[in-house]
Amino acid sequence: MSERKRLSAEEKNAAVRASLEPLAPGERPGAVTVAMVIALLLALGNLALLAFGTKVQGGTATPLGGILFAFLMLAAAAGMWRARYWAVLGFQALLGITLVISALSLVRASNLLGFLLPIVILGAGGTLFWKLIRAMARIQLPTRGQPGRSE
């Protein structure tokens, strides 16, 4: 009776790392491009809402907060355009917070839209979050012939 040896978690991780291809110069993974477009749309949409003086229901919104958020999203979009690890990581952190808030909002859903919108956000955002993990691993890989990547 021959028993196959189970791979340890580190052996599995090493196998996955070995299968990853480093990014070619100027290459940007598709998930990073999608995240960059979303960040850009959020920034521009936020600035447009500020320009039109949109009021926030149930709270107070300051122009400074809106401008800071727009600046943050523009910086993330610019960093993701250049496939920078820090930009993808920061966007993914904000995406994770959004996913948690969407999941918690399901508890207070009082109508169909209040139920469906978080489900859509969880589905689309969760898929993007998952795909960004592999993209971040590829961004971290050194290019062929280089011992490490300095940025």
Image: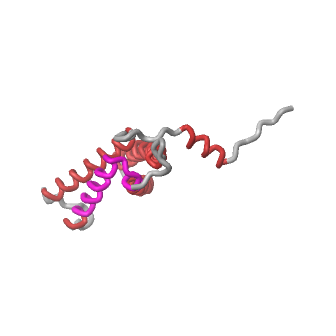
Q: Seen from this angle, which residue lies furthest top?
A: 1
In the rendered image, the quadrant that contains the N terminus is: top right
Depth order, front residue of 142/127: 142
For the point 38% across and 38% down, the residue is 30
Q: Residue furthest left?
A: 52
Residue 77 image position (x, y, % from top left):
30, 50
Residue 135 in which image quadrant = top left
User: Residue 6 versus residue 105: which sits nearer the camera?
Assistant: 6
Determine which quarter of the picture holds residue 7.
top right
Residue 4 falls left or right of residue 16 = right
Against 124, residue 104 (above or below) is: below
The vertical placement of 56 against 8, above or below, is below
Q: Main secondary structure of the magenta part?
A: helix
Residue range in magenta is 66-89
Q: Residue 78, image x and y in percent?
A: 28, 51
Foreground of the two, 16 or 58: 16
Percent coordinates x, y for residue 94 in the rendering: 38, 56
Res. 108 in view: no
Residue ID at (25%, 59%) = 71
Residue that lies at the very extreme toward the front in this rendered image: 145
Residue at image location 73% in from the left, 42% down from the top: 6
Q: Quadrant of residue 18?
A: top right
Q: Is residue 87 visible?
A: yes
Q: What is the count of numbered marks?
A: 0
